Image (cartoon, rainbow, N blue to C red):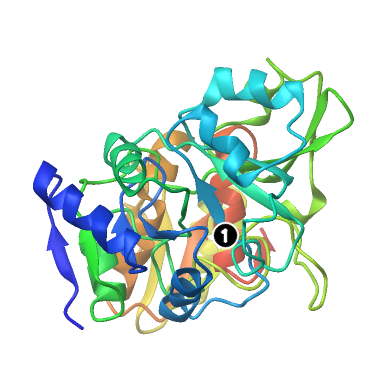
């Protein structure tokens, strides 16, 4: 199979929608990361997503819709708070978990009785869902465990020959996957996966917002998971990743003491001058770090890095999402300096 590189022209989007309707897999740009799009109601199509990614079957997929009216195709028992959150944050990088409709196949929900639903903000994603005429299941478009793709080129590198086509929508504006929440009581939510929509954002709508402990800790084998991206090692380049938590001076001292061939550092903008090893920077604030993280992890693979030491970002706001991706990329290897 030759994976086609499509543009965002009306003709190419019509063609991509027909591929989805016929049970094929299409790379779809969203504001977060590129996704592997399939008809969420077609179990055979969804099976192809798992096969293309090499994804474990108990890792649920998020269902994407283009209009609020479509939510009832995927979810039931939708609380009033969900509509308030949708008004505040949809279209956008927020996924809400609901009891699933019977027509959502168990393979789509990872064997769970619940399903995550979101309305992406990217205009190409919205148009493709509308043209396909069905809710779209779309996990990140990378091989399972590796950094998510934020450009069409990333996705083609991972998925060439595995899927029918990739629609090129340019670079993703957010750069990390959506915030995932579950409802607690009538007016509370629990953050299962952090993203661009922060705890502080959610507190403007929900009266109680808690952060699930699994965000910062490993989930044991056999333990059920309600959100994608929270089980198994994720987002990892081929290099070993180690987070170093401390001052920049302590970071430099540690890296120099452990210097060897193909050791790299990933630091903040404006840093690196005091290092005697090759380095990349990944932004000066949390939003920039979210936008750049996955592309920089991929660049480290291109540079054949063997060991990467990473400066730890702040752990609140959007920074919590960046830190969550990094600790999973590192297999929870964090050294306090």
Residue at 41% from the left image edge and 58% from the top image edge: 266
Residue at 72% from the left image edge and 68% from the top image edge: 111
Q: Is residue 156 visible?
A: yes
Frontmost residue, 119 versus 231 = 119
Q: Is residue 259 visible?
A: no
Residue 280, picture quadrant: bottom left
Frontmost residue, 258 versus 231 = 231
Q: Position of residue 243 (x, y in %)?
A: 58, 62
Frontmost residue, 107 versus 138 = 107
Q: Position of residue 8 (x, y in %)?
A: 15, 45
Q: Is residue 76 above or below residue 294?
A: above
Query: In the rendered view, does 254 fall on the left or right side of 116?
Result: left
Frontmost residue, 203 versus 274 = 203
- In this figure, what is the number of numbered marks? 1
Q: Disc 1 designates what residue? A: 61
Q: Is residue 244 above or below residue 207?
A: below
For the residue carrying disc 1, how many other residues have a C-alpha within 10 Å: few (<14), some (14-19), or many (20+)?
A: many
Residue 19, picture quadrant: bottom left
Query: In the rendered view, does 229 fall on the left or right side of 47?
Result: right
Q: Position of residue 154 (x, y in %)?
A: 27, 64
């Amino acid at each position: 199979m030759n994976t086609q590189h499509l543009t965002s022209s009306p003709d190419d989007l019509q063609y991509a929608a027909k591929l989805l309707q016929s049970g094929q897999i299409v790379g779809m740009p969203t504001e977060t990361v590129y996704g592997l799009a399939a008809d969420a109601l077609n179990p055979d199509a969804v099976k192809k997503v798992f096969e293309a990614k090499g994804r474990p079957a108990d890792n649920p997929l998020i269902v994407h819709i283009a209009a609020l009216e479509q939510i009832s195709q995927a979810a039931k028992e939708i609380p009033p708070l969900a509509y308030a959150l949708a008004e505040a944050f949809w279209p956008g990088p927020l996924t809400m978990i609901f009891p699933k409709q019977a027509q959502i196949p168990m393979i789509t929900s990872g064997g769970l009785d619940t399903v995550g639903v979101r309305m992406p903000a990217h205009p190409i994603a919205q148009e493709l869902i509308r043209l396909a005429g069905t809710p779209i299941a779309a996990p990140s478009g990378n091989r399972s465990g590796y950094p998510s793709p934020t450009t069409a080129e990333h996705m083609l590198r991972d998925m060439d020959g595995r899927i029918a086509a990739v629609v090129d929508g340019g670079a993703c504006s957010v750069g990390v996957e959506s915030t995932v929440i579950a409802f607690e009581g009538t007016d509370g939510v629990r953050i299962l996966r952090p993203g661009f929509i922060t705890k502080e954002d959610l507190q403007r709508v929900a009266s109680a917002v808690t952060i699930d402990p699994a965000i910062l800790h490993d989930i044991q084998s056999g333990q059920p998971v309600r959100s994608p991206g929270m089980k198994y090692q994720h987002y990892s380049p081929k290099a070993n990743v180690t987070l170093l938590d401390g001052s920049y001076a302590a970071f430099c001292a540690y890296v120099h003491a452990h210097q060897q061939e193909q050791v790299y550092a990933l630091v903040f903008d404006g840093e690196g001058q005091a290092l005697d090893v090759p380095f990349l920077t990944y932004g000066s604030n949390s939003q920039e770090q979210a936008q750049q993280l996955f592309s920089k992890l991929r660049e480290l693979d291109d540079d054949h890095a063997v060991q990467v030491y990473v400066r730890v970002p702040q752990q609140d706001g959007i920074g919590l999402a960046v830190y969550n991706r990094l600790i999973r990329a590192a297999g929870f290897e964090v050294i306090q300096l």
